[in-house]
Image (cartoon, grey):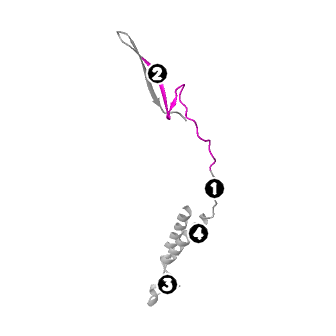
Amino acid sequence: MKKILIAATAALCFAGNLSAVETAGGAAATTTAVGTITAPIVVGAAVGLGFVGAVLSNNRGSTTSVEPGPGPGPVDPTCNGSDPLVDGVCTGTTTTVTVSGTGTTTVPVTFTYMPTT
């Protein structure tokens, strides 16, 4: 992309110099001394050649294809502590103790969480 911008900048520099073409009067006043090659044609050709040169210089690279390996393989999911893995979900139990004015209540609580891989 940088090469295309440099070529376009160079072409625009030449275009500024080519805009002051003097021609003789009379019937040939609409053309230059070369004939029908006018400043816009020269600028267009310079930009086109710069673009073609940039494309040609950028397509000379080479690529190396690297195929991915088999990888580490599947990793077994693990749960914290002694919690069992049930249908892809870790289930754990804990006991909640509630103390009130009349006594103590113990309630088992079951919870679930995603295993680590």
Q: Are marks 1 and 3 in contact (CB under 8 Å)?
A: no
Point out the stretch of residues depicted in magenta. Answer: 68-96
Residue marked by disc 3: 36
Distance between mark 2 and mark 4 Cα atoms: 74 Å
Give, as a three-letter code, the residue at label 2: Thr
Q: Residue at x 55, y 32 (%)?
A: 78
Residue 12 to residue 61: above or below: below
Q: Nearer the viewer, residue 80 or 29?
A: 80
Q: Earlier in the sequence, mark 1 or mark 3?
A: 3
Q: Which mark is residue 53?
A: 4
Considering the numbered disc 3 on the image, is that residue within a helix, a strand or a loop?
A: loop
Which mark lies nearer to you, 2 or 4? 2
Q: Residue at x 36, y 12 (%)?
A: 100
Residue 27 horizontal/vertical position (percent): 44, 90
Residue marked by disc 2: 94
Q: Are marks 2 and 3 in contact (CB under 8 Å)?
A: no
Distance between mark 3 and mark 4 Cα atoms: 25 Å
Q: Considering the whole magenta stretch, tell me its main secondary structure.
A: loop
Q: Tell me which corner region of the image, top left, top right, bottom left or bottom right, holds residue 46.
A: bottom right
Label 4: how many residues lie within 10 Å, few (<14), some (14-19) or many (20+)? Answer: some
Q: Earlier in the sequence, mark 1 or mark 4?
A: 4
Residue 79 to residue 3: above or below: above
Give, as a three-letter code, the residue at label 4: Gly
Residue 5 horizontal/vertical position (percent): 53, 64
Label 2: how many residues lie within 10 Å, few (<14), some (14-19) or many (20+)? Answer: few
Which mark lies nearer to you, 2 or 3? 2
